[in-house]
Image (cartoon, helix red, strand yellow):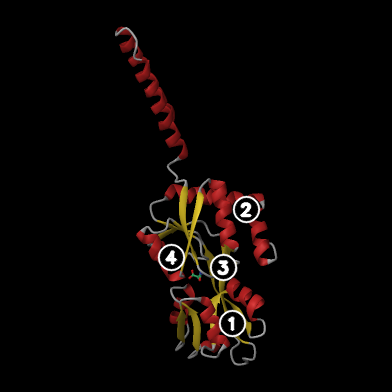
Amino acid sequence: MEIKKRSLWGILLIAMMFVLAACGGGGSESTSGGSDNADKESEKSGDGGLKDTYTVASDTSFVPFEFKEDGEYVGFDIDLINAIADEVGFEVKLETTNFDGIIPGLQTGSFDIAIAGITITDERKKTVDFSDPYYDAGLRIGVAVDNKDINGIEDLKEKTVATRLGSTSADYIKKNIEGAKASQFEQLDQAYLAVENGSADAILYDSPNVAYYIRTKGEDSLKMVGDLYQAEQYGIAFAKGQDELVSKVNEALASLKESGKYDEIYEKWFGEKPE
Ligand code: GLN
């Protein structure tokens, strides 16, 4: 395609030179203008129309994937999207919002990309596009340290289970746990607090989040029980209609895995290499 365009310009140039020569010269400006345009044309098709800067939405707080520390956003997702952006060659304009605002924001075009431990689901695929999976997760239960009644998912029947608005966990509780009341919070801190102060019997949320929260903040008040429920995979989400960007991001993800950079980021946040 590029070659064809170039040779077309070449033919045009030669033709113009003949015309100019016939007119007795003096029109060199217009020929150089023509070749400039030809260069720009090939640059554009080479870069493939990617933007210099993309607006990337993330969650206000989902440890250890994104959270504020000393006034700055840090976490696994933040490191990963920055590494991907370096690899593909774009700047990240980070914007954080409540989790339940992320997918609507992609749909309305407020954001181009989102990384927020977003589980890939068929339902969400109807409204946004996803990268290849970048993290394997699932759902886990957290209860008060002194709770002896709840030891697994079957014990959550008829109980009040804290979760977050718009999450796969909220969906799971509604669909799979008989008689349970899903107490849905906008922010996760409120959900954990509800279990700590006894207004909810348990929290059911993403396994890495429950594990990290308990390890760093809730060791004295909360414990994890039961198994991993519902295997999930996280993907980077995109406003629809950016196929080229999605494939560039997938290539970058693969090359970060290949180079060991992905493992390095993983180890930084989870204390061990991925399995
Ligand atoms: N993985 C969960 C979901 O996609 C929640 C992610 C989050 O709270 N950031 O619904």
Residue 16, placed above or below residue 130: above
The residue beneath circle 3 is 67
The residue beneath circle 1 is 142
Image quadrant assignment for residue 198: bottom right
Q: Which of marks 1 and 3 precedes in the sequence? A: 3
For marks 4 and 1, give the one nearer the viewer: 4
Q: Amino acid at mark 2?
A: Lys
Q: Quadrant of the C terminus?
A: bottom right
Residue positioned 63% across, 73% down in the render: 212
Q: Which of marks 1 and 2 precedes in the sequence? A: 1
Residue positioned 50% across, 85% down in the render: 161
Does the residue at mark 3 contact the one at mark 2 (Cβ under 8 Å)? no
Q: Quadrant of the N terminus?
A: top left
User: Residue 136: where, in percent of width, then height?
Assistant: 58, 65
Q: Secondary structure at mark 3?
A: strand
Q: Which of marks 4 and 3 precedes in the sequence? A: 3
The residue beneath circle 2 is 257
Please tell me how crowded label 3 is: few (under 14), some (14-19), or many (20+) other residues with Cα within 10 Å: many
Q: Secondary structure at mark 4?
A: helix
User: Residue 12: where, in percent of width, then height?
Assistant: 35, 20
